[in-house]
Image (cartoon, grey):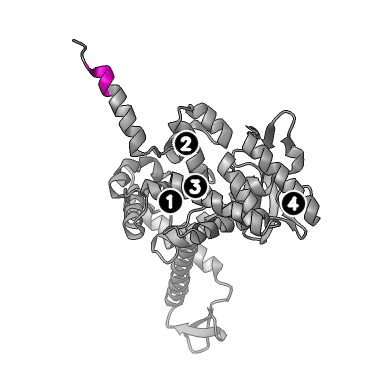
C-alpha cells in the first residue's frame, strides 16, 4: 500500500529545498538570537528580514518564492494568451499568404476586410485556443446581421476565420481546429437575399443605342479623345476595362481577323502604380474582328497618326497610355450625359454583351470563351434575360400554336 500522505510530505520537502536553494542570500543568526536574511526588492534591490527562529525565516523565504512563482506563472499565462490572440494569428496567416506570393492588391483587400469584420471586436482579442465552434458561429451570425452581408461576403468572412484556424493548427498553436465542427448551413438563413434588379446590372437596347450615339458624337467633336473609342470597343467585345487598357496593336491580326487578349492593366493599391499582368483567369483568348470592330480600329489608327499619338497601346494619347480607370470613368460620364438615372460601368456592358449572346442562342461554353471566364461564372453572374415583351410574345404564340391540338 502507498502512503499518500507520506508521498505528499516528500514532495513538499523537495519543493521547499528547491526554493531555499534558489535564494541568493545567506541565512544567519544574529547576536540578538534572531534569524536574518535579505529578500529581493524591486525598488531598493534588497531588504533585510528577521524572524525568531531558523524555521520561521526559512518559511518566509519559501513563501516569498512561492508567491513569485505564482506571479511569474500568471504573467507567463497572460503572455501566452496575448501571443495566441486571433488578431496576431490573422497577421501570421496574412504574412504566410504574402510569402506565397499574393499580390499587393490582395494584401490590401485582406487589411480592408480585417477592419470591416474584426477591428474593435472582442473576437479579435480572444485566445484562439479557448475558442469553440459556438464562439465562431455566434460571431459570424452577429456580423452577418450587423453588416447585412450577402452570401458572397459571408463566405469571405468564413474563409478568413477558417484559414486562420487551419494555419494555427498546422503550426501547432492549437491542439484542435474548431472550424471543422462549424455547420456553415446555419449562416444561410441570415444572409441578405435582396437581389439587385436586372436593369441595374445590364443596359437596355435604348441605353446602348444612346451611349453609342454619344461616343460617336465624341469622335466627331473630340477625335483625339481615346476613352470614347475604348467604350465603343467594349460594346462590341465585352472586354474588361483593364484588358482594353492593356491592348496593343501587336495583339491585332487584321488579316486573320481576330484580337488576342492576353494582358490586363492592374493598379497596385499599396504602391499607387499601374502595371501589366495576365488576364483575370490567367489565360489568353481570341476575339473575332467583326466589320464594326475593323472600322473602329482603322478610325483609331487614322486619328492617332493625325495627332501623333500612335504608340504600342491601342488606346494611347500624345501623353501616353490611357488607363483602365479613365475608360471606366468615361463610361459613367456617358451615362450622365445621356440622362440615365443610374450610372453604369464597363462591367454592365460586359454583362449586356454576354446576355445578348445567350438570348440569341449562343451556348455558355462559347460565350464564356469569348468573354474570358468560366461557364459557372457565365451562368451565375453574367447571364440575364434582356429580351423585350415583343420577343416574348412571339415565343409564347409560337409555343401555343405548337401545343394546339389539330382537329
Name the chief secondary structure element in magenta.
helix
Task: Please tell me which of labels 4 and 2 falls first in the chain.
Answer: 4
Q: Point out the frontmost of discs 4 and 2.
A: 4
Could you tell me residue 293's position as x and y percent? Answer: 64, 39
Q: Can you identify the residue that label 4 sits on?
A: 303
Task: Please tell me which of labels 4 and 3 falls first in the chain.
Answer: 3
Magenta run includes residue 402: yes
Cα separation between marks 3 and 2? 12 Å
Q: Can you identify the residue that label 1 sits on?
A: 157
In the displayed structure image, the side of residue 324 where residue 313 appears, left or right: right
Residue at image coords 69%, 47%: 246
Q: Point out the frontmost of discs 2 and 1.
A: 2
Cα separation between marks 4 and 2? 31 Å
Residues rendered magenta in the picture: 400-404
Q: Can you identify the residue that label 3 sits on?
A: 208
Q: Point out the frontmost of discs 4 and 1.
A: 4
Quadrant that contains the N terminus: top left
| Mark 4 touches mark 1? (CB < 8 Å) | no
Which is more toward the observer, 63 or 37? 63
Amino acid at each position: 500500500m502507498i502512503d499518500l500522505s507520506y508521498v505528499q510530505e516528500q514532495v513538499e520537502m523537495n519543493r521547499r529545498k528547491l526554493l531555499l536553494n534558489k535564494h541568493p542570500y545567506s541565512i544567519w543568526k544574529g547576536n540578538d538570537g534572531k534569524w536574518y536574511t535579505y529578500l529581493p526588492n524591486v525598488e531598493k534591490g534588497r531588504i533585510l528580514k528577521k524572524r525568531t527562529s531558523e524555521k520561521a525565516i526559512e518559511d518566509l523565504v519559501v513563501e516569498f518564492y512561492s508567491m513569485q512563482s505564482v506571479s511569474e506563472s500568471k504573467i507567463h499565462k497572460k503572455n501566452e494568451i496575448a501571443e495566441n490572440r486571433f488578431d496576431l494569428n490573422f497577421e501570421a496567416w496574412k504574412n504566410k499568404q504574402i510569402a506565397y506570393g499574393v499580390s499587393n492588391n490582395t494584401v490590401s483587400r485582406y487589411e480592408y476586410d480585417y477592419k470591416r469584420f474584426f477591428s474593435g471586436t472582442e473576437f479579435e482579442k480572444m485566445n484562439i485556443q479557448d475558442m469553440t465552434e459556438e464562439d465562431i458561429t455566434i460571431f459570424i451570425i452577429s456580423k452577418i446581421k450587423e453588416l447585412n452581408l450577402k452570401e458572397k461576403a459571408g463566405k469571405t468572412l468564413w474563409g478568413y476565420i477558417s484559414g486562420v484556424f487551419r494555419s494555427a493548427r498546422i503550426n501547432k498553436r492549437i491542439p484542435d481546429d474548431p472550424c471543422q465542427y462549424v455547420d456553415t448551413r446555419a449562416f444561410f438563413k441570415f444572409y441578405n437575399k435582396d437581389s439587385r434588379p436586372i436593369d441595374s446590372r445590364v443596359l437596355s437596347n435604348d441605353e446602348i443605342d444612346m451611349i453609342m450615339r454619344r461616343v460617336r458624337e465624341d469622335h466627331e467633336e473630340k477625335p483625339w479623345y481615346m476613352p470614347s473609342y475604348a467604350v465603343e470597343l467594349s460594346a462590341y467585345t465585352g472586354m474588361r476595362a483593364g484588358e482594353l487598357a492593356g491592348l496593343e496593336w501587336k495583339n491585332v491580326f487584321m488579316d486573320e481577323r481576330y484580337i488576342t487578349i492576353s494582358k490586363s492593366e492592374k493598379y497596385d493599391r499599396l504602391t499607387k502604380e499601374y502595371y501589366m499582368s495576365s488576364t483575370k483567369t490567367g489565360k489568353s483568348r481570341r476575339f473575332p474582328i467583326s466589320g464594326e470592330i475593323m472600322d473602329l480600329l482603322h478610325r483609331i489608327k487614322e486619328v492617332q497618326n493625325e495627332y501623333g499619338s500612335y504608340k504600342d497601346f491601342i488606346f494611347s494619347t500624345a501623353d501616353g497610355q490611357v488607363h483602365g480607370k479613365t475608360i471606366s470613368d468615361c463610361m459613367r460620364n456617358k451615362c450622365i450625359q445621356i440622362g440615365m438615372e443610374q450610372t453604369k460601368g464597363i462591367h454592365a456592358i460586359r454583362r449586356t454583351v454576354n446576355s445578348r449572346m445567350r438570348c440569341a442562342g449562343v451556348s455558355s461554353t462559347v460565350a464564356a470563351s469569348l468573354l474570358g471566364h468560366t461557364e459557372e461564372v457565365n451562368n451565375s453572374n453574367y447571364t440575364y434575360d434582356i429580351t423585350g415583351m415583343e420577343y416574348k410574345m412571339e415565343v409564347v404564340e409560337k409555343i401555343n400554336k405548337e401545343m394546339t391540338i389539330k382537329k
